[in-house]
Each structure stands twice: as structure tokens, then as C-alpha cells.
Image (cartoon, grey):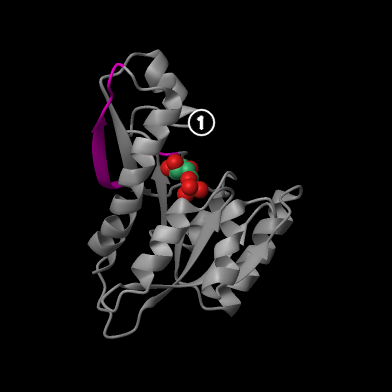
Amino acid sequence: MNQSLGNKKISTAVFISGKGSNLKSLINFSKKKNSPILIDLIISNTKKAKGLKYSNQYKIKKKILNFKNHESAEKKILKILFKKKINFICLAGFMKILSKSFIKKFKGKILNIHPSLLPKYKGLNTHVRVIKNKEKFSGCTVHLVTSTLDSGKIIMQEKVKISAKDSAFSLKKKILKKERKIYPAAIRKILN
Ligand code: GRF
């Protein structure tokens, strides 16, 4: 999606459900002068998401939506996104699956980060499965979001070596470190 930016940064929303370490790295990235994005909104499906603290810290508007009724939650999100003229979405540990019709409205404009070397280990509990299968390598992938889970075009990947001492927990930490590096790089790649 190469596009000419001029000086204007693309208004972006980050969707989270948890700790928000990727959110934090994206906020720091967006503050750089030459970053193509500006984070204007944080969306969460739960008020328990620890990453929501970055809303206060960095003065970014947040919205928490109850997904018990998925359709109505998405409708509300769309309304907010259009109102705030959000033009790009980064999923960062967002634990809800967006509907086909939602994705269609932001076609080619939603990125996700997944903690495996896709197409291997789609879905949940990647690190546990990777360790159980005694893989030698794992990693993380930034990809475009399509209506098939963890299957959109791969924008960037980074590999990590798994040592004999690694547990699912240590692997998660190792990979998160790489995630925080490749998410901004992938955004630059598709938006610059
Ligand atoms: C990351 O491992 C990401 O790949 C996955 O969920 C985790 C989110 O971590 N989709 P954080 O909330 O950004 O710390």
C-alpha cells in the first residue's frame, strides 16, 4: 500500500487486549518525526487490558468495547473510527477476531503481529506448541489482516533461535523483544 504521505501522518488506532508492550513501542515509534503514523486511538475489548495505562501516560484517547455482542461492538468501533478519521489499524495482542465485513471496510489497512513464523503455528498458545514440538527456531510475523485467521500477506518476519533451556515463557520474552522491533519496521515498509 505505498502511498505518498506529504507531511501528514496517517491517523492510526491500535487494538489491544493485554499488556500492550507492542502498543508502547508503536507509540514511541509514532512520535518520531519521520514516522508515517500517528496513534490517535486505543481500542480494547476489556478494561482489564494493562496496556490501557498508556492512554493516560501518552494522552491518547481510549475506548473499551464489550464484545458480548460482537456485531454491535464492531458497529460502535466503526463509528468511532470514521468519526476520528482513522485510516490505519494495528492489532497488537487483540484477542477478538474481526468480522469479514469489518475487515473489508479497512481492506489492506489492518496489520497484525503474531508470535510465530507464519504460516507455522497460527492461532493461540504458539510458544507452548513450539516448545512441545522441539522446534529449533521460532519468531514473529507482521502480516496484513484478512478474513482468514493469521493468513494475510506477510510483511515482515524475524527469526529467533530456541535454546535447550528455553521454556514457553522465556521464548515469549525473547520473541516479544523482536516484535517490538519489527512492528514499526513493517509499518515503515508498507506505508513509506
Ligand atoms: C504478542 O506476543 C503478539 O504477538 C500477540 O499477542 C502478544 C501481545 O503482547 N498477538 P503485548 O500486549 O503487546 O505485550
Residue 56 horizontal/vertical position (percent): 60, 70
* Structural crowding at the residue carrying mark 1, measured as other residues with C-alpha within 10 Å and reported as few (<14), some (14–19) or many (≥20): few
Residue 13 horizontal/vertical position (percent): 50, 66
Residue 77 lies, with reference to residue 22, above or below; the image says below
Which stretch appears magenta?
A: 150-164
Residue 61 horizontal/vertical position (percent): 60, 73
Q: Please report the residue visible at 48 percent of the width from the left and 32 percent of the height from the top.
A: 123
Q: Which image quadrant is residue 114 in?
A: top left
Seen from the viewer's position, the closer of residues 62 and 12 is: 62
Of all residues, the one furthest to the right in this rendering is: 68
Specify whether residue 53 is in view.
yes
Q: Is residue 42 left or right of residue 128?
A: right
Q: Please report the residue visible at 68 percent of the width from the left and 50 percent of the height from the top.
A: 48
Residue 132: within the magenta?
no
Residue 181 lies, with reference to residue 38, above or below; the image says above
Kind of residue sitting beneath label 1? Leu
Of all residues, the one furthest to the top in this rendering is: 133
Query: In the rendered image, which residue does mark 1 sit on?
Result: 124
The quarter of the picture where the N terminus appears is bottom left
Q: Please report the residue visible at 58 percent of the width from the left and 68 percent of the height from the top.
A: 55
Seen from the viewer's position, the closer of residues 97 and 47 is: 47
Of all residues, the one furthest to the bottom in this rendering is: 7
